[in-house]
Amino acid sequence: MPTGTSARVVLLGAPGAGKGTQAAVVASQLGLAHLSTGDMLRAAAAAGSEAGLKAKAHMDAGRLVPDADVLGVLFERLEGLRRSGQGFVLDGFPRTLEQAQALDARLAPWGRPLDQVFEIDVPDDRLTARLVGRRVCGACGRNYHVEFRPPAAEGRCDACGGALVQRRDDTPAVVSERLAVYHRQIAPLRDYYRRRDLLTTIDGDRPAELVTKDLLAALSSPAAKGG
Ligand code: AMP
């Protein structure tokens, strides 16, 4: 498979499984673009555009944003990467079978399909603990956890001093809705990628460094899937 800066990788996993953290590290180590649809939608909401505010209502309730809105922001970024030839790590997309099919249809004319898909697997009770305790710097976006990764000074970002906040969708009721949505959608996605022999499951209930090590090893292996 293409390695280094041209690989095309998808990270699947429930909310809180560590997709964002792993995607950022893997992308920076391999020179890939990190594409998080959640970050793109939050940026659109913060910018206050009509589409962004519509997306925000879905996000705050833990529901999926309609495909047309997600595909629009994502495909614009993919088009830029097609021109530059840079590979990518997709984080938070696809979330449904329809999105997976739309992605394949988009990549097909470029003659550059996906190389590998990982599912980071973490039990639900661990996911809930991770999400409900998560805090995010309102200024620079860095992640903390009240128990597992507390800041040096309570409520303040170590990096920039910004105030730490809880994402509206990390409250217990919304977390339980997000996990329910994930479990409803993931089975057909798993089947879809398994049939294409692209899927590798990684145990995500371990320290982040060990998960990264497995991901990088799988991506650099000559026997990697999709080769
Ligand atoms: P995340 O940051 O990946 O946990 O995403 C946060 C929220 O953004 C989700 O709960 C959805 O409301 C929305 N979202 C992110 N990615 C997608 C997607 N691929 N399809 C639909 N909604 C999405």
Image (spheres, grey):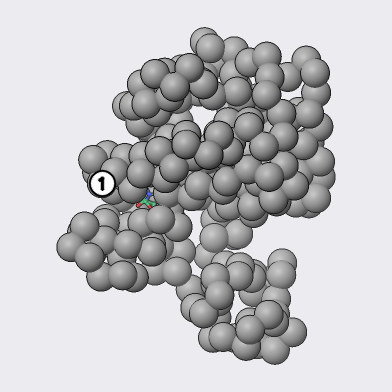
Name which quarter of the figure residue 219 lies in. top right
Q: Is residue 13 visible?
A: no
Name which quarter of the figure residue 163 lies in. bottom right
The residue furthest front is 83
The residue sitting at 29% across, 43% down in the picture is 72
Looking at the picture, does residue 3 appear above or below residue 161? above
Q: Which residue is mark 1?
A: 69
Name which quarter of the figure residue 157 lies in. bottom right
Picture coordinates of residue 221, whole percent (x, y)? 80, 23
Q: Is residue 201 visible?
A: yes
- Count of numbered labels shown in the rendering: 1
User: Front-most of 162 and 113?
Assistant: 113
Q: Is residue 68 left or right of residue 125?
A: left
Looking at the picture, does residue 182 appear above or below residue 208? above
User: Front-most of 58 and 24?
Assistant: 24
The residue sitting at 74% across, 84% down in the picture is 152
User: Front-most of 122 and 31?
Assistant: 31
Q: Is residue 117 left or right of residue 99?
A: right
The residue furthest left is 50
Q: Is residue 21 left or right of residue 188?
A: right
Q: On the rendered image, what quadrant is the N terminus found in?
A: top right
Q: On the rendered image, what quadrant is the C terminus found in?
A: top right
Picture coordinates of residue 86, whole percent (x, y)? 58, 38
Using a 10 Å C-alpha cutoff, classify the residue at mark 1 as few (fewer than 14 neighbours), some (14 to 19) or many (20 or more): some
Q: Is label 1 in a helix, a strand or a loop?
A: helix
Picture coordinates of residue 184, whole percent (x, y)? 38, 33
Q: Is mark 1 within 8 Å of ligand 1?
A: no
Q: Amino acid under label 1?
A: Asp
Picture coordinates of residue 111, whole percent (x, y)? 48, 17
The residue sitting at 52% across, 10% down in the picture is 195
